[in-house]
Amino acid sequence: MDKFIIRGGNPLTGTVRVSGAKNSALPLMAAAILTEEEIALENIPHVRDIATERRLLASMGAVVELHEPVAPEDGSSTAPLSHTTICCRSLSEPVARYEIVKTMRASSLVLGPLVARTGLARVAMPGGCAIGGRPIDLHLKGLEKMGASIVQQHGYIEARAPRLRGAHIVFDRITVTGTEDLLMAAALAEGESVLENCAREPEVADLAGLLTAMGARIEGAGTSTLRVHGVRSLHGARYCINPDRIEAGTFLMAGAITGGDLTVAGCNPDHLGAVIAKLREAGVRVDVVAADAVRVRGADKLAAADISTEEYPGFPTDMQAQYMALATQAEGVSLVRENIFENRFMHVQELVRMGASIKVDGNTATVRGPARLSSAAVMCSDLRASASLVLAALVADGETVLDRVYHMDRGYERFEEKLRGAGAQIQRMGDVFPPRFGPSGATHA
Ligand code: EPU
């Protein structure tokens, strides 16, 4: 199992470029199910969850091809984007098998499109995961309202409908993939659907963008009410995925916690409002330096500031763990409230093992800082918890060994390479210990 070995102490400087958004790419790939024609997606990140989704689509009969970028003949330096084509002309097996679903809960995103396109979907029920129960009852309730009959047995959900009907659906609570699943279903349903209390995350708007390019008729993209006029069929399209706002936010935190001067390029600053506001409140200098770039400059002293995770445009739950690492370095008490998932504090014990002072009571963590963090052997428990531990390690004394980095690989593309490019001392290792760095911090071969 791979590990990261990180020596703290270097401020991050220079420029780091973000990849395409994993949480956009997953629903956009699932949307390819809705048409017989080819969908070409640019800017898909090379991360493990995407590989899993490729495998899932291929297991159903889709032809999925990754096209690596070809360098421009004129020698210009603009890096071309890779793209993935997906063709679901024949879906011989409309089944999402447990072996795949258990490794990635977002697999439930194929439910709506499969039943809309083929009239039948069999999807393994996702179990819980490190951050909470992850139910999909709201996806099912919505599909039933659209006329699907749903049976759950042997660990699978089977949904059937000769053709889905448009419906008026008010989500009991805001769900990102639930909104996406029903939006895809509504695109091919007969008649009009009105979806209320929808997630307003940029990833939902990204999906609406692709669906519209495929011929879907959607009003209200990016708002909490989506109105969809169902069409008989959708066609092929080419679409470029939004940059990953959580990766961008993670790098902003990395620049801030190390007291560096880092420009995060290739991002959309409009999607980072709550994160930028909180960094400023903590005393960090953050400037939007271009339409797609944000520069962060660390403060001599970080100030404590509370966060409370909310649906977009509030502070994202996917940035809570990284913010907590930053809060360990701030002067005073920061309260971190997690309102979206019931168990998303798995990083706390590992941060405490590194010397942080954090107490958890229910959904609130009280972080007292600044703490002098020291290196330790720590373990990743989920994707964002892993990022939090990397940030802590970047400012800890000595050399931290971070185990189970496959969690990190699920959602961050070449994370350690990008950090290294900005001056971090981080190495990926197989099962290798003891330390890889000499006293000067130089890496051993
Ligand atoms: N919920 C229900 N019933 C449902 C669906 C959701 O009760 O049918 C609850 C959940 O248990 C949770 C809340 O509603 O308490 C919100 O969950 P949501 O459905 O919005 O989460 P998700 O769609 O499963 C996506 C992201 C997560 C991100 C959340 C919240 C993808 C593939 N995943 O999950 O991303 O944390 O929205 O923003 O888009 C990550 O990237 O690390 C990650 C976990």
Image (cartoon, rainbow, N blue to C red):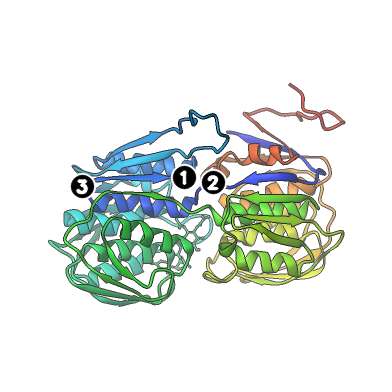
Q: Where residue 267 sits: x, y (%)?
A: 58, 54
Q: Residue at x 77, y 51 (%)?
A: 261
Q: Amino acid at mark 2?
A: Ser
Instruction: Give above or below for 275 relative to 260.
Output: below
Q: Badge 1, how many Cα within 10 Å: few under 14, some, many 20+? A: many
Q: Residue at x 32, y 60 (%)?
A: 212
**Circle 2 is placed at which residue position?**
19
Q: Secondary structure at mark 1?
A: loop
User: Viewer-proximal residue, 434 or 142?
Assistant: 142
Instruction: Give above or below for 178 relative to 55.
Output: below
Q: Where residue 33 sits: x, y (%)?
A: 26, 50
Q: Does label 3 or label 1 sit earlier along the sequence?
A: 3
Q: Quadrant of residue 234?
A: bottom left
**Circle 1 is placed at which residue position?**
43
Separation (CA) of disc 2 from disc 1: 7 Å
Asked whether the viewer can see residue 385, the reply is yes
Q: Amino acid at mark 1?
A: Asn
